[in-house]
Image: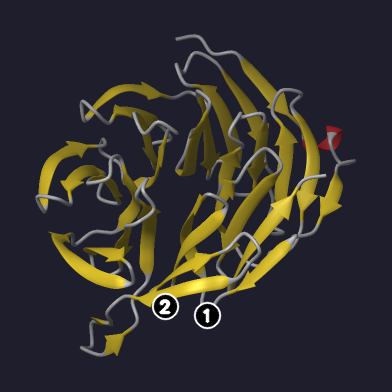
Amino acid sequence: MRFFLFTLFFSLTLYAGVISPKVSVKTSSAVLDFIVRGGDIWAGTANGEALRITSKGKIISTTALPVMEDSWGEKIKQKIMSIDLSSDTKTLIVAGEDGWLYTIREGKITKTVYSTKTVVKKIAFISDTKVMLALLSNEVVFFDLKTNRVVKTLSGGTSPLSDMALSKDKKTALIAGEAGIVSVIDTGLMKITRRIQGGNVDNIYKVDIQNNRVLTAGQDRRAILYTLDGKSYIRFNGSFLIYTAALSPSAGVMAATMDEENLISVFDTHKRQKIATAKGHSATLNRIIFIDEKRFVSCADENKILVWELP
């Protein structure tokens, strides 16, 4: 397969202005994962709290997971590894550090029958009753909440998985990990339909899909923007490990952590130019999600969530 490669050099884009967060939300511990629905933010923290936060930064609900036992038998607060919200916004699905899946509905926590001894890297609703999990062990699991059973398990390859992303219509899922390859999954058929590769040569930390474009954030200091068919890509070079990256809904704007200063670099993907630098985090970033073409949200290994707005 032939690839068309464009490389973006930072020396051409140093003029981009610095922006500060519009909203800063203080949390009791680091936020490991979050999602955005209707402008509100649902977040999972390192001390097991599931938070709902308004677009103005007010925490309006907090639900804590049950404590777990550590290797010494001590009771400790457990991390929320991943979180998602059903399309009717009534049910949260939460992957706990203890390996169990929990649902939260109207503040009530229910433990499902599903548990794993590996780490859940990402969980997502593919319908109001079915969820999809990407496991560190390289497996992809389809679990039905209504019947409380595993529907199907797929092998994601031979390498550990790092992240998963769903298209807006939830018909397509992407998984990626240490192999530097993106696997495309038809969620209806529950099967891998193709693999996208060529841009990354090492572990992919994060993956995103918007408007038939695929974005990766790599340990190889590359952010790769593929077409969904995998026939072409644009390469954005970083100066450090790129821990996370995200696309706006149109895929016309990209935000990524391209250096070791915990800054977020924002690019116009059509012009392949840097348009802004978002400064406000002081720790390694965990996730970035766009609300719309101008606003995005980010979290890091620190006790806050930041909301940004482009000029």
Query: Alpha carbon of mark 2 to alpha carbon of mark 1: how far?
Result: 8 Å
**Residue 282 in view of the camera:** no
Q: Which mark is residue 233?
A: none
Q: Is residue 67 left or right of residue 298?
A: left
Instruction: Pinpoint residue 308: horizontal percent, then vertical percent.
Output: 71, 54
Q: Is disc 2 placed on a helix, strand or loop?
A: loop
Which part of the image, by quadrant, shows the C terminus? top right
Q: Is residue 90 left or right of residue 115?
A: right
**Residue at (30% x, 65% y) in the render:** 104
**Residue 53 in view of the camera:** yes
* Residue receiving disc 1: 28
Q: Is residue 172 left or right of residue 54?
A: left
Determine contact: label 2, label 1, CB under 8 Å.
yes
Q: Nearer the viewer, residue 254 or 50?
A: 50
Instruction: Pinpoint residue 267: horizontal percent, then vertical percent.
Output: 73, 36
Hey, which quadrant is residue 128 in on the image? top left
**Residue at (37% x, 58% y) in the render:** 82
Mark 2 belongs to which amino acid?
Answer: Asn
Q: Nearer the viewer, residue 55 or 153?
A: 55
Mark 1 belongs to which amino acid?
Answer: Ser
* Residue receiving disc 2: 47
Q: Nearer the viewer, residue 146 or 207?
A: 146
Q: Is residue 32 left or right of residue 99?
A: right
Q: Is disc 1 placed on a helix, strand or loop?
A: loop
Location of residue 45 with respect to 240 vertically, above or below: below
Which part of the image, by quadrant, shows the N terminus? top left
Instruction: Pinpoint residue 90: horizontal percent, then vertical percent.
Output: 34, 56
